[in-house]
Structure formats: C-alpha cells, structure tokens
Amino acid sequence: MDRTAGYADSWHRQPVPPPLDRGSTSAESAIVAAVWLMADWTRDGTPGWRSECVIGTAPERNVQPWSQPPSPSDVAAIGGFDAEPDSASVLTALVQPGPNRPYEHTRPPAEVAAELVTLLSDRIPATDPRGQALLAHLAELLTGPYTDLLRVWTGGDELHLVLRDSSGRTLRLTVAPAPATEPPPALGDDGALRTRLACVITLLSTQLWVNNNNPVTFRVWLGPREDADPSAAAAGWWTRTREEPPDEAPELRPLTAEELDDGLYTIVRSSLLDLFDGSWSGVEEWPHVPPGHLTRHLYRDLLDLLLARTGGPDAPPQLLCTGYLPTQDMDDDLDSEDDYYGTVLFVGPAEVAVLDLDLTC
C-alpha cells in the first residue's frame, strides 16, 4: 500500500476522488473527513444514509453578505444544485451592523451547532459514544468562527447545508436517507482502508498541533512481510519508506500494546489544542484529555485498524519502534528537532505496517 496521509497534509496530501480532487482547504477537508468517517462508523446502523460534498465558490462576504439568503438562482449556483431550490434560510452569518463596524455573528455558533446536532442526528444513526462525539465535532466544524451557513430545502427529506468561508469558497453538504448507509469513496488497492485511515489522520491533525503553524502529522504504509526475522522485516520496511535513503536502519526497540497506547495518548494529550486556554497561570501539570473526547476515539481507531490488519488469527503483530514515542511523560528536553519524529512498526505473519509520527517543526 502506498503512503496514506491526511487530506490536508502539506507535503503528501492524500488523493481524493472527483469532484473533490480540484482542491479543498484544510477546513473543508476536515468536514469531508468527518462525514466519510461517520459513514464508516455507522455503516451497520439504521436508518441508512448517504452524503454528498460539493466544493464551489460564491461572492465574498463583503460583496454579498448573507444577512438574508441569496436568491434561489444564486443558491443553486453556489451549492451546485441541478435546479433552483424551494427555499433557503440563514443559520448563521457574519455581518457588519454598520459602516466600519466589525463583523458579528447573526447567531451564536454554539447555538447553531446544537441545532445541527439535532438535524444530523435525525438522519445519521450515531448511537454510540464515538459516533456522538464525531457528530458533535462535525457540527462544530460547520459553524466555525469565520463561516456563513445556509440551510436549503429542495422538496425532499434531504438536509442541505451550504457553508461559505471568508474567501468565498463554499462547501455543500447533503445528508439524505438511503436503504443502507453508503460507504465513503475508495481509490485504488486497499481503497476502503486507505480512506478510513486518511479520515482519521485528517481529523487528528486538525486538532493536534506542535505549534501555531505545524500540526502533528501521521503517515502509514502497509506491505508484505519479506523476512522471517521480525526485526529484519521491520527494518526493511522502515528503510524503504524513508524519503531519503538512510545509511543504515536504526536500532529498533520492542514495544507492548499498552506502551503503544500510552505513547499515542501522550502525543494527543501534549498536542491537543482544546486543552490550552492561552495561559499557563496556575498550571502545574498538563491536563488530561477529557473522557469521551473525539481524539481518544480517533487515535484508538488508528491503532485498531493497523493491529487488526497485520495481526494473525491467533496472535497480535509484534511491535517495534524507533525515535520519539513518549510512553510515560512528555519529553521537552530533546537535543534536536528531528528527535521529535518517531516510527512504529507492526510486524504480522504476512504484512508489515509502518506508522510515522511527526512532531517536528
């Protein structure tokens, strides 16, 4: 399996199917990833549902403020609808109350997000804790601090939402009933697995940050095991997945499943933007990730996918790692920025998976 990365990866952006392959912003990529991952996480639930995401453009906010919804013909063009809709309403928008006044929300984003949770829950069977956490996160993404949002009616049971950002880019999300939940699109060999991994990675990287400019980056490879010795098999795959040919493979250290979980949790805990309120006053210990937070479900899903894929019927894969994996506490005293790069290797009976963890700047 070729490299799998996030849909917003700055260097190795994961390919997406048409028409999304014409380019999307990081914010749009996160919404698409949340919708597609929701389809995977609720695929056995009822009722079934399907989604459609359409990228477009609209006049910028200063040209056409959405204090009132645009005309039906404009909404059709902006949202990529086949015909003019029956009606539209503004769920929230940034408008200027007067000349030279700052923009203000027509409704509080949290209020609109709560409304969206209800609307989405009526159509998506997100009944378990991780599905509910993802649905709430999707509602928050749709009501970001710099977005305008329309709800559009076309005469059916579909939920149509049209989001516009500050530059005039738009994303139309449609959620509609279906006999069974429609799986997300898949490209190439192992397409379904790669799509799910890319969605998880995208959502993790949009919430985990090294600093103001650099997200935590995850990348995955998967391929056949070519050596009976686990360390040699792991070293071979580590070597072939480096961007520049290394002089030699590093020393690999064994890892337990518990240490792997602890290491990923520590990375999440040390990088989660939600835990930092802008002040260190009175903070004696880095706070823990709240129970039920979406990132707990995301990192666990990432590990479970790789463990299940590489594990045999009677035994889990052997785990090895090199580089940065803080299994106990955050380490802020490393000698070099490159020291904040780690790799975990999952060596199964037939396949090897490589998980790169990049916390460099």
Image: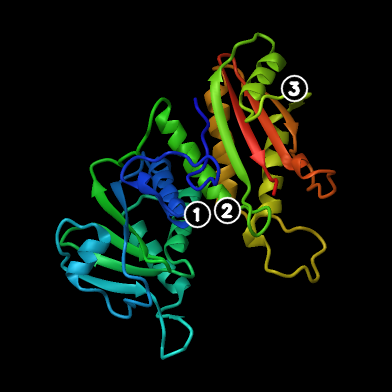
Q: Is residue 100 above or below residue 42?
A: below
According to the picture, the residue beneath numbered tag 2 turns out to be: 292
Q: Nearer the viewer, residue 205 or 160?
A: 205
Q: Is residue 148 visible?
A: yes
In the image, taking residue 242 as reference, residue 62 lies left or right, namely left
Q: Nearer the viewer, residue 83 or 280?
A: 83
Q: Residues within 10 Å of mark 2 (few under 14, many from 20)?
A: few
Residue 142 is situated, as x and y percent measured from the top left of the image, at 42, 62
According to the picture, the residue beneath numbered tag 3 turns out to be: 247
Q: CA distance from mark 1 to mark 2?
A: 7 Å
Q: CA distance from mark 3 to mark 2?
A: 43 Å
Quadrant of the image occupied by residue 228: top right
Q: Residue furthest bottom?
A: 98
Residue 265 is situated, as x and y percent measured from the top left of the image, at 68, 45
Q: Secondary structure at mark 2?
A: loop
Label 3 or label 2, whichever comes before in sequence order:
3
- Residue 133's disc number: 1
